[in-house]
Image: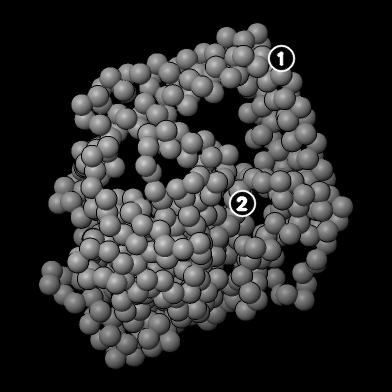
Amino acid sequence: MTGDHPKLVDGSASAPSDKRSDAPPIESRVAAGGALVIAVVTLVVLIAFTARNLPYVLASVLAGTLGISALWIAATNRRYRWWAAGSALLLVSAAVTSLVAVGRGAVAIAAVIVGIAASSALGALALRWEIRHALARRWHDVQPARHGVVLMNPRSGGGKVAKLHLADEARRRGIEPVLLDDGDDLRALAEAAVARGADALGMAGGDGSQAMVAAVAAAHGLPFVCVPAGTRNHLALDLGIDRDKPVRALDAFGRARETTIDLAEVNGEVFVNNVSLGLYARIVASDHYREAKRRTVAEMLPDLVGLHAEPFGLTVTGPDGAIADAQLIQVSNNPYTLSSATGFGSRPRLDAGALGVATLTINRTSDVSRLVALEAAGHPERYAGWRQWTATDLEVRGSPLLAAAMDGEAHTWKPPLCFAIRPGALRVRIAAGERGASPAFLHAPVRVSSLAGLARVMLGRQSGIMANQTVHDI
């Protein structure tokens, strides 16, 4: 089950492996039993309410489906945008009203929401011990760096480097800060730091800069420190670093924890998160995207995926053969979890030794409502135009020049684009007080296997839920 987990790591040293217990403690077994009982009761309430009020429930589902289709028309068709938006609002309102208008409908809905929340919270508590063990296997303690160097991009994240006085904070910790000026070559600055005797390299900036410095650290076998001073900081998110506390991330140069992660590359260039081709790449390439992201998306979407949109001309070979004319191809450094709302956009692990590949093809407006419904159910893979798989290498073919967004930065390459994974290529350090796990790791999607796993915990065995999420022992 899912839920908001409390902070799992308090900064103390990880427990030695020989002191771990393979059996869940009694409090975890009780919590697992409670989660299962509440889940069953909630399911019974939902089935009973649906059976007694089937016409109203079906009307709500139909109105909601039509509302989603209308929203898609509003986003992709300029001519009917406002009419479609108004229709969507009315349809969604009708969907909600249809359920609430039923006798005690609001009470039933509230009971189901409370039941799901309570079951999720107890499920999270039941699995807390297993998560702790997984994280203890992931990270090991290391001594302070003797000569740490952190490169800083003053323009990233709206000027976080200056606002948070990161250079001064680095000096106070005995770390050498190197600020990037206009026209500077970031890779050359990182190489110069290595030449001066740096035994740990860090980067305070966006994910594109993180990838460049991480590549240098990997080439020299040095540990890397990610300081989340960019806008989105997706690498920090998946490393389990608190993105709201860039100053604390500098403590990774002191007594810290370390692990190894994979790096990915496309045509010889390293990336730490993902490369997107097609829809997102075209939008990111716009000159107006940085200043007005939402407005740019709204203005470009009709021309990119509307009825008269030109195909992107992308071709990639999947497990079942060639996939042509996808609106989106995303290749990532390890697979993203895309089947749950809480884990969307993050990766449960960064050391699986595989590229994550996802493609999306939308041909009709009706496809959108089906995709959204399947996403809500946690099974987007059942959508006919959705493909997701893993690979150790990949080739993408297309037009003479392919626009791509690599770690959020616009790039252009001549095809083919050749992707590869570099297993265990980078040593990474994080501060002792960081969580050390991504949302996708901590919030596993709810499936039947989740309930079966909780049942195993209740009976005194390991859940098995974390088996596919944990990393190899260090």
Nearest the eye: 87 or 135: 87
Q: Residue at x 44, y 74 (%)?
A: 393
Count of labels in the image: 2
Q: Is residue 291 above or below residue 23?
A: above
Instruction: Give the percent coordinates (x, y) of residue 378.
Output: 57, 44
Q: Residues within 10 Å of mark 1 (few under 14, many from 20)?
A: few
Find disc 1 in the rendering and name its residue. 52
Q: Is residue 264 visible?
A: no
- Secondary element under disc 2, as helix, strand or loop, is loop
Q: Residue at x 22, y 71 (%)?
A: 414
Instruction: Give the percent coordinates (x, y) of residue 88.
Output: 38, 22
Find disc 2 in the rendering and name its residue. 444
Q: Residues within 10 Å of mark 2 (few under 14, many from 20)?
A: many
Amino acid type indicated by mark 1? Arg
Q: Is residue 368 visible?
A: yes
Instruction: Give the percent coordinates (x, y) of residue 195.
Output: 29, 91
Q: Earlier in the sequence, mark 2 or mark 1?
A: 1
Amino acid type indicated by mark 2? Ala
Q: Indicate how the structure is coloured in the image.
A: one colour
Q: Residue at x 80, y 36 (%)?
A: 37
- Secondary element under disc 1, as helix, strand or loop, is helix
